[in-house]
Amino acid sequence: MWGSSKLANCDAYFEMIQSRKKLPQPLQETLTSAFARIPVSSFPLVPGGKVIEIPAETSVADAVKILSKCNIMSAPSAELAAVALSASTTTVAGVVAGALGTTGAVALGITGPDAIAGLTAAAVGAAVAGGVGADKGLGKDAPAAANNLGEDFYNVILQEEHFKSTTVRSVLKSYHSAPFLPVATDSSMLSVLLLLSKYRQRNVPVIEPGKPEIQNFITQSAFVLGLEGCKGRDWFDCIASRSISDFGLPFMSADEVVSIQSSELILEAFKQMRENQIGGLPVVEGPKKKIVGSLSIRDIRHLLLEPELFTNFRQLTVSDFTQIISSTQETGRVIPPITCKVDVTLGSVIHILASKSVHRIYAVAGNENEIAGVITLRDVIACFVYEPPNHSDNYLGFSVKDVLND
């Protein structure tokens, strides 16, 4: 939940960035001033031109189906409350919760992320222990259920009563980690960039005063992709040609990067992501943390969709997990981690993030590709602006801090 401590972290993060930048002050002021003059209405619309919304009375099961069908990770609610549910992240919480013995969340009446963890774990448990599996004639043991459910797994667990009866509204009542902070169509892109960077919002809804529909939905990924499209423009090339060290990147050092050894259990990796509230981490080997792979929270889907993984997920190591996944890919080999050297240009980092459609890139040093830090979409966006005094209060039409402290 948002509070004074997290707001203090936002301030500390942005102050640290500004102190580490080596850009000339006039250049920083010019960039910030330029984004302040660009209206939000000029930003390209979402694919298809219409924002997918999820009404607050939608069941969790139907919300997951909508996100899956539209191939999106999040969607705003029609009642102006952010929805950040996805089939992958929901399942992650459930499997980890199940492994840790916290499947009683629903029975205790808990709402929010913990409730989703319990809902999913309860449904998975029913599916593999005989509740749903028996109805389909699949047997009461986990291996039999996993081997036979196959592509129907999500369809089966989403038929569970907990998923069908719990609404998005009930989840949102205590889901404050992604507060709804919209901007108007006539707001500036500077406001959007500050929300996406300093204030840790992964997406910003765009509304038009007096109209109920959400006009646009600007994500961190969409903005970085837009930056990639600015190649050839003088202002962008001037910035992109500079070394990432000129911006103080990577902001997160090697000691601060949460990683997992390839010999550790895969459940430990997903547990680390959950406890540290991160979407991915590098797989490393040895005391010097040589990077050999990477995991995303979305990789949890493989545990459920690959019988070879699901039947043994409590004993599965990270190395085993990645090897088995690679055998199911078209290439038949382990996909190498997405990295960059510590002396590359900002433009190179933007190109990799945009072309690979990833949220983070790991900076490596030396011939052994030792982890030197991580660079996220948020970090890249923060490189382009600073926050003028009282900007949020004066130009967003409300106090961001008041909303986040709610």
Image (cartoon, helix red, strand yellow):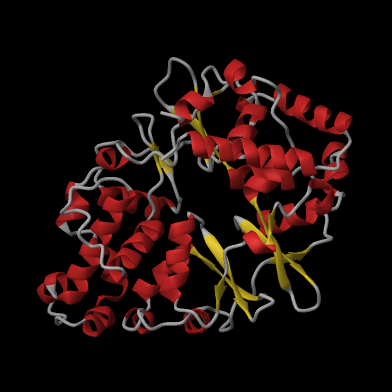
| Relative image position of residue 140 (x, y in whole percent) | 14, 81
Q: Is residue 130 left or right of residue 15?
A: left
| Relative image position of residue 298 (x, y in whole percent) | 46, 63
Say which residue appears at 23% left-offset and 48% top-offset: 110
Q: Is residue 324 left or right of residue 242?
A: left
| Relative image position of residue 212 (x, y in whole percent) | 39, 22
Q: Is residue 49 visible?
A: no
Q: Quadrant of residue 311?
A: bottom left
Q: Is residue 213 left or right of residue 30?
A: left
Say which residue appears at 12% left-offset and 70% top-offset: 131
Say which residue appears at 27% left-offset and 60% top-offset: 120
Q: Quadrant of residue 3?
A: top left
Q: Is residue 174 left or right of residue 104?
A: right
Q: Quadrant of residue 198?
A: top right
Toward the viewer: 51 or 83? 83
Quarter holding the C terminus? Answer: top left
Quarter holding the N terminus? Answer: top left
Say which residue appears at 17% left-offset and 48% top-offset: 165
| Relative image position of residue 4 (x, y in whole percent) | 49, 33
Q: Is residue 154 visible?
A: yes
| Image position of 154 with respect to 137: above or below | above
